[in-house]
């Protein structure tokens, strides 16, 4: 379910639509919905925080990080994946998703959904480039 064509902005309305799609279920194939057990988001971006707020309103557990996925990996993802938990979704920078993809491979998981979004607005963080792309995704 990869998006082809020019990337688009992630608006609050679009973020809600993504989360509402089948009540946080994404089809992995015909008739095989996947429920998100966890939603990760990069708290440095306004769009990511809006996405997470919508996920919380839908009853999903969310986990914030500040660009470095290491602590989330050790404290949350690694134990969950080792125990065989379900799918996770989120919105991160391309480098954040790259790290998650590499870690997921060790647990026989892969990216099922990847949607690219254009420019994001960092929240008063001079270390984040102003024109940073974001990607929303599902790993299972």
Image (spheres, rainbow, N blue to C red):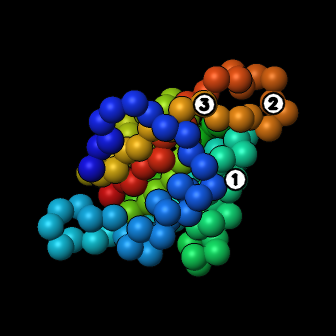
For residue 136, the mark is none
Question: In which quadrant will I find the C terminus?
Answer: bottom left
Question: Which comes sooner in the sequence, label 1 or label 2?
Answer: 1
Q: Which residue is mark 1?
A: 49
Depth order, front residue of 1/6: 6
Asked whether the viewer can see residue 61, the reply is: no
Q: Is residue 113 left or right of residue 99?
A: left
Task: Look at 63% across and 60% down and name the residue there.
Answer: 52
Q: Position of residue 61 (x, y in %)?
A: 59, 70
Q: Which label sits on residue 125?
A: 2
Tell me which corner region of the image, top left, top right, bottom left or bottom right, holds residue 129. Answer: top right
Tell me the element at label 2: loop
Residue 10 percent coordinates (x, y): 56, 45
Q: Does residue 93 appear in this view?
A: yes
Say if 13 sits above or below 47 in the image. below
Q: Which mark is residue 119?
A: 3
Residue located at (39% from left, 54% from top): 138
Question: Where does the image place residue 91, in percent across and percent down from the top left?
Answer: 54, 47
Mark 2 touches mark 3? (CB < 8 Å): no
Q: CA distance from mark 1 to mark 3?
A: 15 Å
Mark 3 closeness class: few <14, some 14–19, many ≥20 residues within 10 Å: some
Q: Residues within 10 Å of mark 2 (few under 14, many from 20)?
A: few
């Amino acid at each position: 379910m990869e998006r082809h064509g020019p990337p688009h902005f992630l608006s609050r309305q679009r973020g809600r639509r993504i989360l509402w799609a089948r009540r946080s279920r994404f089809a992995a194939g015909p008739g095989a919905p996947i429920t998100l057990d966890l939603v990760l988001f990069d708290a440095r971006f306004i769009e990511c925080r809006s996405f997470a707020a919508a996920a919380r309103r839908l009853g999903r557990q969310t986990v914030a990080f500040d660009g470095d996925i290491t602590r989330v990996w050790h404290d949350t993802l690694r134990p969950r994946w080792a125990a065989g938990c379900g799918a996770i979704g989120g919105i991160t920078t391309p480098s954040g998703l790259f790290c998650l993809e590499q870690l997921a491979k060790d647990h026989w998981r892969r990216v099922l959904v990847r949607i690219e979004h254009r420019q994001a607005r960092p929240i008063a963080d001079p270390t984040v480039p102003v024109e940073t792309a974001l990607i929303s995704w599902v790993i299972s």
